Image (cartoon, rainbow, N blue to C red):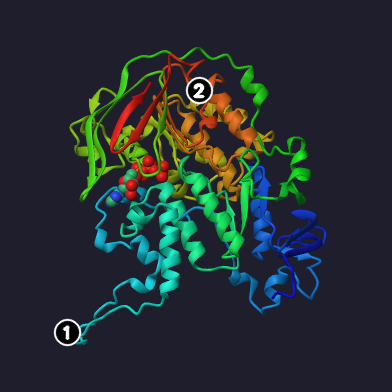
Amino acid sequence: MHRWRSVINIPNANVYRFGDGRYAQPLLRDLMWTVKEGESWAVIGSGGGGEKSVLFSTLLGRYRLAPYPPPPGGLFPFLSSDGLDPYSEVSIVSFGHRRQAGGAFYDYSARYGAVHEEDRLTLRQNMFPETIPPLRMPYEDANATLEPTPIISDEELAIFNDLVAQMGLGQFLDLPLIALSNGQTRRARILKAIIKKPKLLLLDEPLTGLDIKARPLLLSTLRDLHAKKKPRVILGLRAQDALPDWVGHVALVKGSTVTAGDRETVLRNTEHILGGWHGQSNKIRSIESPKAQIGKVLIDLKNIKVQYSNRKVLHQLSWQIRQGERWHLVGENGSGKTTLLSLITGDHPQSETSSHLRLFSQPRSRIPTTLLRSAIGIMSPELFDAFPRRSTMTVWDVIGTGFDGDFVPKGKKSVGSGIGMKWRMGRVWEVLDVLGPEAWKHFAKTSFPSLSLPQQRVVLLMRALVGRAPLILLDEVWSGMDETMVRVVREYLRGGGGVGPDQAVVVITHWEEEVPWNRIEDSEVFKRFRLGGGKGWVEE
Ligand SMILES: Nc1ncnc2c1ncn2[C@@H]1O[C@H](COP(=O)(O)OP(=O)(O)OP(=O)(O)O)[C@@H](O)[C@H]1O
């Protein structure tokens, strides 16, 4: 029996960065938050400034609390009674974070390429490194058996197998990690965090990128785990996300203020206090944009097949994309959406060789990849992970790379070296003006990596739109954005001049409400292409 009944105890404190001087502004002011054992909590914040992550980072010991919650008990009373180290017992899975840190570009097309399956760590090996066969040294007896020592008990294995089944990961356990789709990877990261058995698990936006079927399954798995305290779970959600009914308490973060309490009381005030950094909705409304019109075929895929060993991902798929069309590409996690886009963008090796692929009226094989890059404006989770973060790169520089689809700034004004420099510069100001924060002129000079992750996403979205490429591909661009920002981007794309009448757009999202167009008002240009079972079809 625990002597302490609180899980988190912050009677009243300010939160500062380590090393900040005595007169620095606190990141969070007058924070009062107590989580009692048995309560279920969600932290809600507007996505814009990464506010939720400040509160989570505080729990992870990344910021300074003043005054620090006093003994006995301190910040995590439930751990102190057992003498455990909070920082190894509390873990976080956050989907705002990038897979790889640092300034280097990494080749995300590797995923589709020659994945030598035996060379890559599988999902199972990643979960249980002890199952990796040990290396046999030349001086060792060649006949001796080198069985890895199983560390996991039968009981733990049964729990693991249950979780794998509940999370729909069974068929992927022996695939290389790199082969998993976004939704599959996210579920796997949550599973891995659970099997490490933390005492408290912070899950920031766990539903991001999950298909509609997977979401309720994950939530009920989390509810059961939380009820058994294996582990206790605190969810991080965006204001627009549905709050699971089993969550009884909410900590709402707005700027430097946290309002914590029971669900009803806190949510009553949500409407008025949420809304982070957002674009200029009023400016968008004043832009008159001509109606989209269907024109020439830009992308023509015929009987496309993609297969890895005996796994058929796309089978005899045909799809045409024309100028002016607005497509919503849908399908469950792992149905092949990203694979399909990678064929179009040229990141997939089959893209070069397939005779069934015509882009911009030419066989793909005749189009140099650099040209293809400037003809397609793209924003995707892969690009977000891969885009280099050099401290010398400003927001302006990043947006400017969008004209030629580059990853490093080029040209005197950092807008590439093509013709129409004046137009290019005007376009950068335009996207900044519409989608940027109020102080957008100053924002243009800000160092890109110093921005919060949601802000970086918006900048990469500006990069995708700036060049007015004939084809725009937007894969999960709204994840991590707050409701206002989602709305602004939707308005900008729909009628606010974000895309021109002869550009074609494909959006991928598992959230219907994020799609800028709808069947009733945009019936002439809006279409849905669904993937499932390796096939693809236009949904009527
Ligand atoms: N190298 C590979 N080897 C085996 N299977 C692979 C490989 N690369 C991809 N796959 C499989 O192809 C399928 C399609 O993946 P893809 O990323 O295109 O799905 P998606 O529709 O974009 O999913 P999500 O909604 O999760 O983003 C997945 O089931 C994935 O496991």
Relative depth, front residue between 215 and 207 = 215
Q: Which sits earlier in the primary sequence, circle 2 or circle 1?
A: 1
Relative to 469, is 30 on the left or the right? right
* Disc 1 target residue: 143
Relative depth, front residue between 425 and 382 = 382
Mark 1 lies on a secondary structure that is: loop
Q: Mark 1: is the Cβ under 8 angstroms from ligand 1?
A: no
Give the answer, above or below, for where 108 lies relative to 123. Answer: above
Three-letter code for the amino acid on which mark 2 is drawn: Trp
Residue at the image point whose x is 53% and y is 68% from the top: 197
Q: Position of residue 178 (x, y in %)?
A: 35, 54
Three-letter code for the amino acid on which mark 1 is drawn: Asn
- Find the distance from the CA under tag 2 to the CA under tag 1: 65 Å
Residue at the image point whose x is 48% and y is 30% from the top: 465
Q: Position of residue 249 (x, y in %)?
A: 71, 51
Q: Is residue 347 visible?
A: yes
Q: Position of residue 341 (x, y in %)?
A: 35, 36
Give the answer, above or below, for where 251 lies relative to 9. Answer: above
Relative to 61, is 71 on the left or the right? right
Query: Splitting the image into 4 quarters, where does residue 141 fall?
Result: bottom left
Residue at the image point whose x is 43% and y is 64% from the top: 160
Query: Splitting the image into 4 quarters, where does residue 84 fall?
Result: bottom right
Mark 2 lies on a secondary structure that is: loop
Give the answer, above or below, for where 371 lies relative to 124. Answer: above
* Disc 2 target residue: 517
In the picture, the quarter occupied by the N terminus is bottom right
**Label 2 neighbour load within 10 Å: few <14, some 14-19, many 20+:** many
Query: Splitting the image into 4 quarters, where does residue 277 fall?
Result: top right
